[in-house]
């Protein structure tokens, strides 16, 4: 089954061609340069850049695989949401039009489920129930997975997402945008004990987060003369302890059989180290994406479509499927607009 997958939910344009779950071709074009001068993603600029870049990425993927047109694949998959609606519409509309013109099956997927589905068909079997941490620029969630397409929210953030908090703190420390990765590098040179920061909602049994107060404390520390590298190290330590402490509490509570992590913040070096060490202690299998597939990519969209189709070979999304900005509700549906 050949799947052409498109991801345009925020500021990365990504296209992948898969044979089942196996990647054949992948392209990602980051818009970081477009938005850096503005200190954050400008939605209108993001949509325009997706429009400009997407057709050439598709041509490049198909051409490298020796295919002539989108009609040469079996399935066309795209992200329907959550994300920036203007950006989503570019990839979603292109994919719907290509599916309509070619007769290929159309599958619209949920971006959050897709992040977790980077681990679907990765070569190692995941045992369920699993507990999952999804940490990105827009989301911070702890989820229970009973199966690949049976995913329930246990808790989320009450304000900023973890990646957003990293980016805002990086900005305060004088780093560029998005500064999460740079703050991570700076933290390696600082002392995590040097700056005392609050740990909001620290109770590990509460699977919820609040990061906005932490960011305010970071500002005060810098104004009080803290070295940026020490602040970065203390901030990273505090956020990682909160994420991992709450995740592992749920893991123990539900007697999970595996731990999955996904989203851009899982590129963080301390988070990776801490997850590995906690899972090792428990003898728990850990599924961590490589850094390239921690951030937004199209392989995860293709694997999400594969997860849907392996469960229901007749599944498809309606061509009237619309983009959506937010996902609400206790259950995370993989297939959108069935
Ligand atoms: O998953 P993603 O590409 O996009 C969203 O769906 O939001 O995540 C991007 C986020 C940004 O906030 C970025 O700063 C953060 O992931 N990020 C990091 C690191 N690398 C990327 N945060 C902390 N440490 C990193 N090494
Ligand atoms: Zn994402």
Image: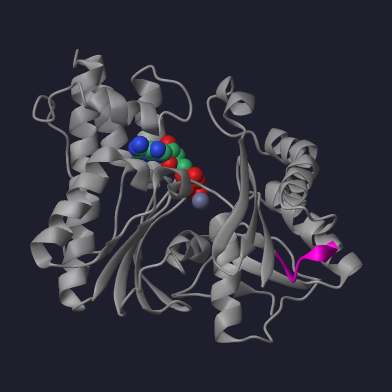
Assign the C terminus to one quadrant of the image: bottom right
Is 84 positioned to the left or the right of 145 in the image?
Answer: right
* Residue occupying the far top of the picture: 225
Is 332 positioned to the left or the right of 268 in the image?
Answer: right
**Residue 164 seen in render:** no
* Residue occupying the far right of the picture: 101
Residue at coordinates 21% horizontally, 53% vertically from top-left?
275
Way the structure is coloured: one colour
Percent x, y for residue 309?
61, 79
Would residue 236 be counted in the magenta stretch? no
Taking depth in this image into account, of 24 and 255 the one nearest to the observer is: 24
Taking depth in this image into account, of 62 and 306 the one nearest to the observer is: 62
Is 157 positioned to the left or the right of 304 in the image?
Answer: left
| Total numbered circles | 0
Residue at coordinates 56% horizontally, 23% vertically from top-left?
36
Taking 178 as reference, is 296 above or below it? below
Taking depth in this image into account, of 130 and 322 the one nearest to the observer is: 130
Quarter assignment of residue 324: bottom right
Percent x, y for residue 77?
68, 64
Taking 318 as reference, is 65 above or below it? above
The range drawn in magenta is: 71-76
Is 290 positioned to the left or the right of 95 in the image?
Answer: left
Residue at coordinates 53% horizontally, 25% vertically from top-left?
39
Taking 123 as reference, is 68 above or below it? above
Quarter assignment of residue 198: top left
Residue at coordinates 58% horizontally, 72% vertically from top-left?
306
**Residue 314 seen in render:** yes
Assign the N terminus to one quadrant of the image: bottom right
Quarter assignment of residue 244: bottom left
Percent x, y for residue 165?
36, 38
Percent x, y for residue 76?
73, 65
């Amino acid at each position: 089954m050949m799947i052409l997958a498109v991801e345009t939910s925020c500021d990365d344009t990504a296209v992948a061609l898969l044979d089942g779950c196996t990647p054949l071709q992948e392209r990602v074009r980051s818009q970081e340069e477009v938005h850096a001068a503005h200190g954050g993603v400008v939605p209108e600029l993001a949509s325009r850049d997706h429009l400009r870049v997407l057709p050439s990425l598709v041509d490049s993927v198909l051409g490298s695989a020796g295919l002539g047109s989108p009609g040469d694949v079996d399935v066309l998959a795209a992200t329907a949401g959550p994300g920036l609606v203007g950006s989503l519409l570019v990839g979603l509309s292109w994919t719907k039009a290509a599916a309509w013109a070619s007769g290929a099956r159309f599958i619209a997927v949920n971006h959050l489920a897709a992040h977790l589905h980077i681990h679907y068909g990765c070569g190692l079997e995941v045992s369920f129930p699993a507990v999952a941490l999804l940490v990105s620029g827009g989301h911070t969630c702890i989820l229970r997975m009973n199966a690949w397409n049976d995913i329930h929210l246990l808790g989320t953030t009450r304000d900023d997402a973890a990646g957003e908090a990293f980016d805002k703190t990086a900005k305060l420390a004088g780093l560029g945008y998005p500064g999460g990765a740079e703050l991570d590098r700076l933290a390696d040179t600082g002392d995590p004990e040097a700056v005392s920061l609050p740990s909001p909602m620290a109770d590990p049994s509460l699977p919820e987060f609040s990061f906005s107060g932490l960011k305010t404390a970071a500002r005060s520390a810098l104004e009080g003369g803290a070295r940026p590298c020490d602040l970065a190290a203390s901030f990273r330590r505090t956020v990682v302890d909160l994420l991992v402490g709450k995740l592992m509490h749920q893991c123990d509570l539900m007697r999970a059989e595996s731990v999955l992590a996904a989203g851009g913040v899982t590129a963080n070096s301390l988070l990776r180290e801490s997850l590995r060490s906690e899972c090792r202690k428990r003898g728990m299998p850990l599924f961590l994406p490589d850094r390239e597939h921690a951030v937004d990519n199209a392989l995860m969209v293709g694997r999400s479509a594969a997860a849907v189709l392996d469960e229901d070979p007749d599944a498809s999304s309606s061509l009237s499927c619309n983009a959506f900005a937010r996902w609400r509700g206790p259950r995370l549906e993989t297939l959108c607009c069935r």
